[in-house]
Amino acid sequence: MNRKSFDAERNTQNLSEFKKFIPGQSVDCVIISYESHQLYVLLLKWKGDTFWSLPGGFIYKEEDIDNAASRVLKQRTGLEFPYLTQFYTFGKNNRTKNFDTSVFLESVKQDSPEVTEWLSQRFITTGYIALVNKSNTRPLPDALSERCEWVPLDELPKMLFDHPLIIEKAMESLLIQINYLPVGIKLLPASFTMKDLQKLYESILKKELDRSNFQRKILKLSILERLEKIKNGGAHKAPYLYRFNKLKYEELLKSGIGFTY
Amino acid sequence: MNRKSFDAERNTQNLSEFKKFIPGQSVDCVIISYESHQLYVLLLKWKGDTFWSLPGGFIYKEEDIDNAASRVLKQRTGLEFPYLTQFYTFGKNNRTKNFDTSVFLESVKQDSPEVTEWLSQRFITTGYIALVNKSNTRPLPDALSERCEWVPLDELPKMLFDHPLIIEKAMESLLIQINYLPVGIKLLPASFTMKDLQKLYESILKKELDRSNFQRKILKLSILERLEKIKNGGAHKAPYLYRFNKLKYEELLKSGIGFTY
DNA sequence: ACAAAAGTGTTATCCTTACACCCATGT
DNA sequence: ACATGGGTGTAAGGATAACACTTTTGT
């Protein structure tokens, strides 16, 4: 498939399809990535407005919700087999009814009243977390948005609905997951330094860790392989590179980890 | 409020109200209790049939889903301020479409075609766990069921839809929760023996624990107060009774526990 | 007195934590 | 050479797990 037709396929969920969806029900994806010691989340900017939101979508009448979430993720990032877990369902009646939303809906109304009507109904949304390697993705806006970008988690723009809450809940959930899942394998490139991994954990846990003890603890899991050193640019001693041993990683997943930082 | 009008209020969610609900969306409650060293779950038996199911309900068009869940719980048990947490949303397209369901729907059709139609639509359901003290409840069937009973978790009857899966997921979720929440306070009577508490943990964790170490670990949390001994019936040495110190329990919740068995 | 349940104590082992020390490298 | 980042080592304290000992009580 060439890039053009691939992108076309990624954009199938368009406005004329509203009737094919279950009304009142949606999925929202908190797509997390990590680069140069910073966590990012993928956001969409609405057309002709200043509001941002999470990439989300609706559920076809005979589609599993898990599938709807992975479809949304594929459409926005191009990723086919992502790490994707449901974490919470947001069902407050007024979750999309705040001042910003009404301003936003007003601004859409002139262009497309039918979109406004669809978006104005009450939605119960199920949140999914995706852990993703930024460099494997090509973000693509959807029919209602003009930009699709990686935004640092600590510089979130003004967002619609209860999306800030959804992100907050997602990060709480990730903080628990990190205790029994080696999330690094999903967020880091094929090879990385121990410092990279530690910084990732520190970003998620929002606290500093002891360098020496972190190294010991991670290595004891024996899911990492040490490669040769790097020498690129950086002054001072060059660190080892590591990569995940996928076989041992799978074994570990089955047997279960108890892991605290 | 006398008992009669109270029960009447508990039964407000009846068939004529279908139009007031969000279609395609439901809540199901896995209501857990504990008595004489056994875990129980509250189940409903459908009218004129052999199938059982979890107590569930639908969501009014302007109602928070959390509220729908606590409403269901109140209607079935009479409990007003329960411990109730959402744990997962089940959204497979075919989750209610198995052989038993079709047999069941066929059997309902003669009596009430409109109920059959409502029940035949695709539902996405959000599961809630409630931890409850059996003796504080008065189970009451709903409009569609003839019995509402506490059933031992290891003697589950034939159940409709994906409800066995929902229960399984609920217990997994409880198994994780027990590591950072002292669930005993919700499931045990006001005073209890250390053995009671240990047996409760063993039921949830499905493994045996060392008596001595369990006692030490629990007492170190210092949320228990020791009362006088009991002497009732039992041969051999009479154990102490304990009760939860709610103040310290609340403090512990805030500061967070790390707790493994 | 005995058996069994309940309370308490002991010990080896492991894990956690907080450091100290050494090594490698670019300036 | 030296400052810095990175790798390794260590020792104190705490937690865990397995088990032994003591106390209480009804029969």
Image: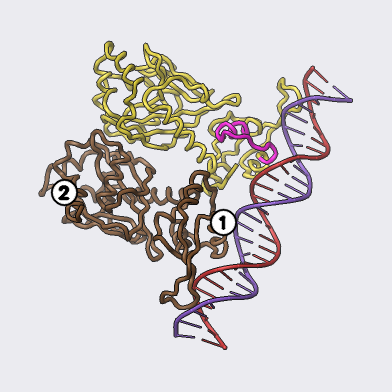
Chain colours: A yellow, B brown, C red, D purple
| Residue at 63% from the left image edge and 43% from the top image edge | A222
Residue A124 percent coordinates (x, y): 31, 32
Residue B185 percent coordinates (x, y): 43, 55
| Residue at 29% from the left image edge and 22% from the top image edge | A119
Badge 1: few (under 14), some or many (20 or more) residues near its Cα, within 10 Å?
Answer: few
Q: Quadrant of residue B139?
A: bottom left
Q: Amino acid at mark 1?
A: Lys
Could you give the CA–CA distance between mark 2 and mark 1, rounded to whole angstroms?
A: 57 Å
Sequence order check, earlier mark of 2 and 1: 2
Q: Main secondary structure of the magenta part?
A: helix
Q: Quadrant of residue A169?
A: top left
* Camera-nearest residue between A191 and B257: B257
The outermost residue toward the left is B110
Asked whether, in this view, residue A56 is left or right of residue B101, the answer is right
Residue A253 percent coordinates (x, y): 53, 44
Residue A165 percent coordinates (x, y): 42, 30
| Residue at 39% from the left image edge and 57% from the top image edge | B187
Q: Amino acid at mark 2?
A: Glu
Asked whether, in this view, residue C9 is left or right of residue A47, the answer is right
**Magenta span includes A201:** yes
Residue under circle 1?
Answer: B220
**Magenta span includes A138:** no
| Residue at 60% from the left image edge and 34% from the top image edge | A207
Residue range in magenta is A197-213
Compared with B12, A49 (above or below) is above
Compared with A204, C18 (above or below) is below
Q: Secondary structure at mark 1?
A: helix
